[in-house]
Structures are given as structure tokens and as C-alpha cells.
């Protein structure tokens, strides 16, 4: 073996020439990339988080080809990692989004209800993706489509640009209805995905790197604002019955939302940003669409909390499907690790990088809850009183739905064999139920009294009507 030990002026000159040649080759190669920007060479990765409100996983083609009509989301799944069993912590928008942004369960980040005297706002002491990245010099922008992810819930912290799209100030949106419930003007405080996409693309095209952009799409949530008529007519037909038409409208909204997501991807590629950006797409929760006798959300069956989740991270293998159970709490730590940043010690989520690279990991347990009883916006109680207080613990095979205030109302499902949750095994599998009940107790997220000290009289009337307290 021969070792080159040359030194002195000749060696220094030769080293300098090779270094200069390497720099020139790199510069020429970078200049040949379409749409690249000189000021991005050697910079850190961008982050694009896209949250799909009220979007069921089985309406994406990459999850169910028979129902899904989502070519642009499917393309991202083919270019990234698709998680087949991703579980959200809630089927209500602010609660689930707080988890996505923090990596914490609801009892940790403090957003438990849509509205009450307390318990609806993200604490200023809780780190979020936006506050962490802002501190690390990322440019941060949020482009949102409804009041439910507004500054009212504390989601504006850490954003340089926070585009809510509201017609009234966020802190004035909620108002008491004659029946005692609190609501917000739905039709005036949401916008379609095309407008949100326009604003997001404009900001991305103008901002410096690196950036964190959060884009929230709302279209599938309701029918107050519909896609263009020519889109709706592709799905809705006169021969369909009322329920079929409702499902068809939902599909048209998912389809249109996907088309706007495609515009967003095209914009990244045109600017040469696609390969320099971590892309995370996740739904906050699903929608009943008649399953389990319910058309909407706020409960904890799989059509509600098993959500689509796709990640494209530079360096991760493409076209991978992960079958292991994962949680939306895992998003924030995964992103922070990929960006080389410290994960807050209180984070309960775990990085998904190992699973994405084919490494075996210990099974995870998912937590979810529905605190409808103490939510002044939860009209669901009039029709589903058994879903007043509901908690869920789930592992890769079994799922427990626990109602602590209602004896004999718990449900246990063998998810691996019964994904549609049709056969309640709570009586025949006591050991499995006991194990998951112990998991819930370890999570310790139970709520036993209304939020706040004033004890709103409407809350008292509701609790009395449902039998939770007696006459005083």
C-alpha cells in the first residue's frame, strides 16, 4: 500500500486548483436546474403542511381506487410515503389541528372543545411548528379556509403572515343562539380552496427561503360553498336519492380540493422548490356520511379518526406504504427531526423516519377523545346523547371506545378483522378491553366538569336534561 505524503507549496497549489474546479462544476450544475434560485444554494429545507378538513381516507384514490378521484394527492403518495393507519386525536377541527401543530395529545395542548368558557385556546406556553421554525429564521405563512383554525384558537402564534379569510374579527365570530348553543356564521367565514391556493402560491413565490407554509382546505366540510357547477354536475345526478346526492356532492368537493392541491404542487415545481420542500398532507378528521347512523363528525369511529396522511421528505424512499399504526401526534417530531431541529421534551409523538426507512419499531398506541358534553357548540348531544363524553385507546389490533359516565356503553372492536366496527366484543374479550382501559388511564385525559368557573346556566340546563346532574 502506497500513501501519498506530498506537501509544501506544490501540494497546496494542486489542492487549490481541485477545489476551484469542484466549485465551478457545482455552480454550473446548479445553474442548469430549471427554476432554481441562486439564493437557495445550501439552504435548509422548506416545509409545506396541507391539512384537508373533514376528508375521509377512503375518498382518496391512493386509499380506495373505487371511490377516490384525487390524481394529484395520489401522485404525491406515489412520490412519498403513505400511512395506511394514521389516527387523529379528535373529530373536531381545532382540537385535531392543535395536535398536528404541536405533537401533543389534547389533554396536553389544552384545546378540548370548539367553544366553552375555557378549554378552546392553545396555550401561549405550548411550542408549535410555527413558533419553533420562526425562532430558527424560517419565514412562516398560514393560508386558511375557515374560522375553525383561526387566531380565535391561538393558531396565529409564530406566523409572519396569517391569512384567516374571515369577514368578522375572529374574537367576535361566536354568538349565542336562541336555544342556548353558541355558533359562528358558517356561510360567511369560510372560503373555497381556489382562493386559499391563490394566496398561498403568491406568498410562496415572493418569500425568501427557507419557509414554512401551512395551507388549510375546507371544501368537504359542508355545502355552503360548492365547487363550480361544471364540477358538481360530474358527480351529482337527478336519479340519485337524497343520501346518494349528499355523498356525490362530498366527492365533488374532495375532487375540486385535489385539483387545487395540484396547482400548489405545480407552483412548487415551477419555482424549483419541490425537491427542497418537506410536504405533509393530512386530514384533521373524517366524516360520517351515514356510517354508524351519523352524517357528520365529532365521534370516534374509524370513518371519523382514521385519516389520510402522506409525507414526502427529501431522502426518504418514494412509493412506500406504512401499515403500522401511527398518530397525528407523530407529525411534528418527524418534521423537526428531518429539519435537524430539537424536539420539545414534552412531545408525545415519535418520529416516523425509522418506519419510512423500513426499520421495525415498537407498536404505538393512539389516543382520541370527544368532549361534547362541555362544548357549547356541540349540538350533537340532542341526537346522540351517548356520545357526550367519549375516549378512545387503540393499538394495531384492538380499539376501545370508552364512555366513563355511562355504564355498559363501552365498545371494543378487533380492528384488524373488523375495520368497519360492526361487532362489539366488549363482553367476550375482557382482557383486551382491560388493557386498553389501562392505557387510557395512563394517558389521563378525562374531563369530569365544565370548563371555567362561572358555570354557564345553559351548561347546567344541558347537564340536567341529559341526567348528569339532579335538580338543585
Image: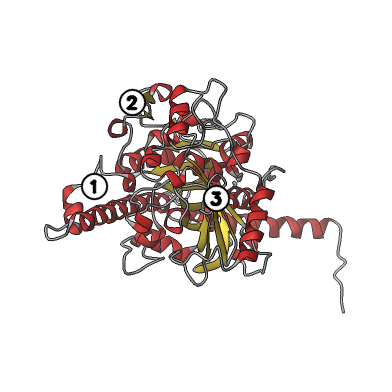
The x and y percentages for residue 468 are: 51, 36
Viewer-nearest of discs 2 and 3 = 3
Q: Residues within 10 Å of mark 1 (few under 14, many from 20)?
A: many
Distance (Cα) linking label 1 and label 2: 29 Å
Measuring 72% from the left and 43% from the top, which residue is drawn there? 345
Taking depth in this image into account, of 389 and 88 the one nearest to the observer is 389
Measuring 43% from the left and 28% from the top, which residue is drawn there? 461
**Does the image show residue 120?**
yes
Residue annotated with mark 2: 177
Residue annotated with mark 1: 227
Task: Looking at the image, tell me whether mark 3 or mark 1 is earlier in sequence order.
Answer: 1
Measuring 37% from the left and 26% from the top, which residue is drawn there? 180
The x and y percentages for residue 330 are: 60, 52
149 displayed left or right of 345 = left
The x and y percentages for residue 93 are: 45, 42
Mark 3–mark 1 CB contact (< 8 Å): no
Displayed quadrant of residue 100: top right
Displayed quadrant of residue 226: top left
Position of residue 343 relative to residue 32, above or below, is: above
The x and y percentages for residue 302 are: 46, 58
Secondary structure under tag 3 reads loop
Viewer-nearest of discs 3 and 1 = 3
Residue annotated with mark 3: 407
Amino acid at each position: 500500500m502506497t500513501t501519498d505524503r506530498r506537501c509544501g507549496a506544490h501540494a497546496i497549489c494542486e489542492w487549490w486548483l481541485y477545489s476551484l474546479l469542484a466549485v465551478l462544476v457545482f455552480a454550473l450544475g446548479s445553474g442548469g436546474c430549471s427554476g432554481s434560485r441562486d439564493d437557495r444554494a445550501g439552504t435548509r429545507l422548506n416545509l409545506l403542511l396541507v391539512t384537508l378538513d373533514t376528508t375521509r381516507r377512503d375518498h382518496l384514490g391512493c386509499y380506495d381506487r373505487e371511490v377516490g378521484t384525487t390524481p394529484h394527492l395520489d401522485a404525491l403518495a406515489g412520490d412519498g410515503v403513505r400511512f395506511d393507519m394514521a389516527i387523529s386525536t379528535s373529530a373536531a377541527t381545532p382540537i385535531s389541528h392543535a395536535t398536528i401543530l404541536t405533537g401533543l395529545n389534547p389533554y396536553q395542548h389544552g384545546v378540548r372543545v370548539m367553544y366553552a368558557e375555557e378549554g378552546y385556546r392553545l396555550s401561549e406556553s405550548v411550542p408549535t411548528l410555527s413558533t419553533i421554525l420562526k425562532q430558527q429564521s424560517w419565514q412562516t405563512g398560514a393560508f386558511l379556509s375557515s374560522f375553525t383554525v383561526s387566531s380565535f384558537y391561538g393558531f396565529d402564534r409564530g406566523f409572519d403572515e396569517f391569512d384567516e379569510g374571515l369577514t368578522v374579527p375572529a374574537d367576535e365570530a361566536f354568538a349565542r343562539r336562541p336555544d342556548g348553543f353558541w355558533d359562528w356564521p358558517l356561510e360567511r367565514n369560510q372560503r373555497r380552496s381556489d382562493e386559499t391556493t391563490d394566496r398561498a402560491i403568491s406568498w410562496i413565490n415572493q418569500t425568501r427561503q427557507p419557509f414554512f407554509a401551512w395551507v388549510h382546505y375546507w371544501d368537504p366540510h359542508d355545502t355552503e360553498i360548492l365547487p363550480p357547477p361544471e364540477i358538481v354536475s360530474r358527480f351529482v345526478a337527478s336519479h340519485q336519492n337524497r343520501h346518494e346526492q349528499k355523498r356525490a356532492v362530498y366527492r365533488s368537493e374532495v375532487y375540486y380540493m385535489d385539483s387545487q392541491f395540484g396547482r400548489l404542487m405545480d407552483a412548487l415545481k415551477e419555482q424549483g422548490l419541490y425537491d427542497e420542500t418537506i410536504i405533509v398532507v393530512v386530514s384533521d378528521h373524517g366524516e360520517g356520511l351515514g356510517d354508524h347512523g351519523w352524517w357528520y363528525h365529532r365521534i370516534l369511529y374509524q370513518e371519523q379518526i382514521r385519516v389520510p396522511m402522506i409525507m414526502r421528505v427529501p431522502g426518504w424512499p418514494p412509493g412506500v406504504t406504512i401499515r403500522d399504526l401511527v398518530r397525528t401526534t407523530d407529525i411534528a417530531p418527524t418534521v423537526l427531526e428531518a429539519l435537524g431541529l430539537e424536539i420539545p421534551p414534552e412531545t408525545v409523538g415519535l418520529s416516523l423516519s425509522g418506519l419510512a426507512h423500513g426499520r421495525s419499531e415498537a407498536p404505538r398506541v393512539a389516543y382520541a377523545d370527544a368532549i361534547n358534553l362541555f362544548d357549547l357548540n356541540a349540538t350533537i348531544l340532542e341526537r346522540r346523547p351517548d356520545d357526550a363524553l367519549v375516549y378512545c385507546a387503540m393499538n394495531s389490533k384492538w380499539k376501545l371506545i370508552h364512555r366513563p359516565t355511562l355504564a355498559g356503553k363501552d365498545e371494543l372492536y378487533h380492528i384488524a378483522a373488523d375495520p368497519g366496527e360492526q361487532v362489539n366484543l366488549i363482553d367476550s374479550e375482557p382482557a383486551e378491553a382491560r388493557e386498553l382501559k389501562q392505557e387510557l388511564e395512563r394517558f389521563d385525559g378525562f374531563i369530569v366538569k365544565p370548563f371555567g368557573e362561572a358555570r354557564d346556566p345553559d351548561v347546567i340546563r344541558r347537564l340536567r336534561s341529559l341526567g348528569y346532574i339532579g335538580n338543585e
